[in-house]
Amino acid sequence: YLYDVTLTDGACQAKAHLAPDLNCLVYRNALRAGSHIRITRCSLVYEEMRLSHCFLQVEALELGGGEDSLSVLRNISNQTRASPYNLTATQRGRDILNTLQLETPLKGGRTHYLPLWNNNDPHGGKWNANRPLAPDVQVNVSGLITLQGLMMTWRNNLDFPRLLVRIMHKSRLRYYGRITTKINCPIQAYFEVADKSGMMPMVLWNSLCPEWYQSLNIGTVLLLHRYAVKPSYQKRTWATPFDPQMKSFRTIEISLNPQHLCTVLQIVPAEQIKPEWELPEVKYNFISRLELEKLPHAYTCDIIGLVTFVGRCERLRKKADSEDFFLYRWVHVVDGSSDQPFILELFSTSQPETFEHIHPMTYLVCTQMRVVRENLSSRTNSPYLTTSNESQIFITGCHKGQPYTWNPQVKHFIQWIKGQREKEMLSKCKVGGYFSFPPVPATFSEYCKNAAAETFLTSTNELKKEIEKLHYREHKRILIQGVIGAVQY
């Protein structure tokens, strides 16, 4: 990954590119917003592939520069204040000014920035939080095609009739950019949409994600035109449908890709949705904490409860030696059906405004959760729940208008919480700190029952190197074998 930094000397600010050799400072969060630095070497870099594009690159710096930091920028600032037009006097100066005014990354040809600690959250002003709805969407029912009809005729058509569908499931964002990727915005998200004939995958590609992703919610009704249809990618994960009567057409998918067609999406306002369209309602599978004890491994369910514990955010590598991380946190939730809480492993679901604001006493709803029973040690018999690729989370302030508000289990929880004393519930709440789950087995043999001990053991000589390789917030268990020489209290 490449990193840009915004630098200031108190009088002006400028954006600069960080040389790859300095990336390790970002990995450890040593270089962060508010850091005082002293730039000891920098250069102007011209990109040959982009006309009149040059930028400042920081090649060496010292941390903790204090008042002497950013001497290079202070000189630039003094020159600019002395003569506001001196940078426009030369072509190089005009190129620098143009670059400083860009909101896009300085290098790499991308049109947007990724979040700093994971790559599957919306980030930056480019993402439209709430796309304004059209006041009146004209739906001509006679000109529509059903998903079943599309399944039967898609090979014979190029220009498909309009589709009227409801969003049933929504995945987190997936960033698929690589050094060789030439697409400006390499992001995708998949949905499952349904009409009266069945359910089908729909994939949102590239620049349509920042434009539409945060407006396409579960339960939203869409009118689609100028879309493409192609065989679906079968290796992806799938949401678990809770309506046994609904047919699934998963061999093909609706592709909304701005590079192929000028796709037209229209969100139908809730007040214009008509019963005669026969669009299916979103179904849920809410369970209580008491019911969880009887459920098998990998069972899919939804839960609602009151948050009593929120752990700090941690990061987990997606692959060994990869720069890609999952962001997750542990949360405890009670629903009154048991003395034991739900233990939730919540990975980021591309809802940063929700994920970052989970706190005790919040009403939390999590959908498409998976039961985890395998690889638990003898020290715990309690299963926990983890998010899936299609999970969505909702907290207090986000529940209004959601399809699950009419679910009997949700209404039952609301009645229970109304009968609780706030002060008593608050006394049971905790926040922060390190929560290790599942607990480590009591014996070494149980720990190694599924793999050779050599794959786990780290020598004391390697321990320092392992710790130095850790990134900010990264979680990793390290196993050391040795003899206890002394114990101090």
Image (tube, rainbow, N blue to C red):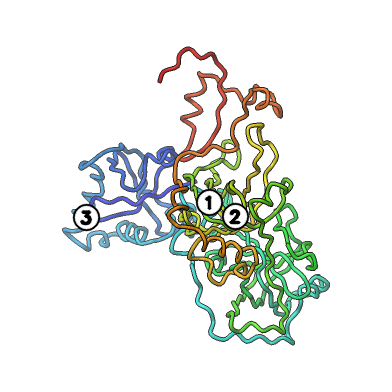
Identify residue type, mark 3.
Ala
Q: Which quadrant of the figure has residue 31? A: top left
The mark tally for this picture is 3
Say the numbered circle drawn on residue 11. 3
* Tag nearer the camera, 3 or 1: 1
Pick whichever of labels 3 and 1 is earlier in the sequence: 3
Residue placed at 73% from the left, 82% from the top? 144
Say the numbered circle drawn on residue 174. 2
Q: CA distance from mark 3 to mark 1?
A: 33 Å
Up/down of 69 relative to 195, above or below = above
| Secondary element at tag 2 | strand
Q: Residues within 10 Å of mark 1 (few under 14, many from 20)?
A: many
| Secondary element at tag 1 | loop
Identify residue type, mark 2.
Arg
In this view, the residue in front, 83 or 353, is 353
Q: Is residue 187 visible?
A: no
Which residue lies most toward the right here?
152
Residue that carries the numbered disc 1 in the rendered image = 119
